[in-house]
Amino acid sequence: MVQPAPPPCPFAKRFPSQLVRDDEFFMSLAYNQAIDAWRLDEVPIGAVITRNGEVIASTHNQRDSTRDPTAHAEIIALGQAARAIGDWRLNETTLYVTKEPCPMCSGATLMARVQRVVYAVPDPKMGCLGGATDLNALPQANHHLLITRGVLEKPCLELLRAYFQLKRREENAGGS
Ligand SMILES: [Zn+2]
C-alpha cells in the first residue's frame, strides 16, 4: 500500500536571535521541533531541555512513526537529557514544551526531578500541570516543579489548530 504524502506544513520555522537566550528563544526551538513533527505527519508538539543555558535535548512527538504510545516529545526529551548528563536526575534542567504535558509526561517530568517546566499552550482536557489538574500540587510529594505558562502560546496554538483542522478535512474528504 502506498502511503499518502504527509500534508505540507504551511508554517515557517522561527529564527530567534542567538543573543537573547531567554524563554522565548528556547520555546522557539521547541516550536521548530513541532514543525518537524508536522512534516512527518505527527501531531506538532516539540520539546527542548536546557541545562545551564545549553540545549541537552531537542525532539518532537513521534507516536505514530514509532507506534509507541509513550513516544511523546517530553518522554523522548527526558531520555535524551538523562543520556547527555549521565544521570536520571535532571536537577537544574528546564523543559520547554509547546503544549502542556499530559498525565504521563507531567508524571515523568516530576519523577525526573526537572527543575522547571515552561509550556506554551494550556490543555484543559489532559494537561496535568494546572490545565485539567495539577500533579505538581501533590501535597506529600518531595519534588515540585517551577512552572511558567504561556510562552509563545499563540504561534504554538495556531500550529496545533491548523494541523487538526487539516486532519478533519482529510477525514471528511474520505481519506484514511
Ligand atoms: Zn505526554
Image (spheres, helix red, strand yellow):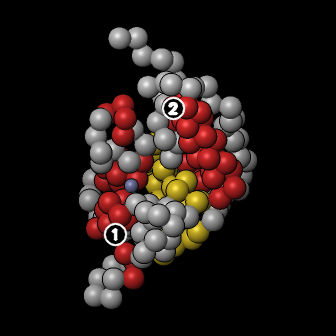
Give percent across and percent down for residue 25. Answer: 65, 53
Q: Nearer the viewer, residue 24 or 122?
A: 122
* Amino acid type assigned to the residue bearing label 2 in the image: Glu
Asked if marks 2 and 1 touch (Cβ < 8 Å), the reply is no
Reading the chain from its start, which is encountered first: label 2 or label 1? 1
Q: Which residue is mark 1?
A: 110
Residue 81 visible in the picture: no
Residue farthest to the top? 2
Residue in the picture at 31% in, 33% down: 66
Helix, strand or loop for disc 1: helix
Residue in the picture at 65% in, 58% down: 153
Q: Within 10 Å of the Cα at label 1, are there few (<14), some (14-19), or many (20+) other Cα atoms?
A: many
Q: Which residue is mark 2?
A: 171
Q: Nearer the viewer, residue 171 or 71?
A: 171
Q: Nearer the viewer, mark 2 or mark 1?
A: 2
Query: In the rendered view of the protein, which quadrant contains the N terminus?
Result: top left
Helix, strand or loop for disc 2: helix
Is residue 151 found left or right of 58 in the rendered image?
A: right
Q: Quadrant of ligand 1?
A: bottom left
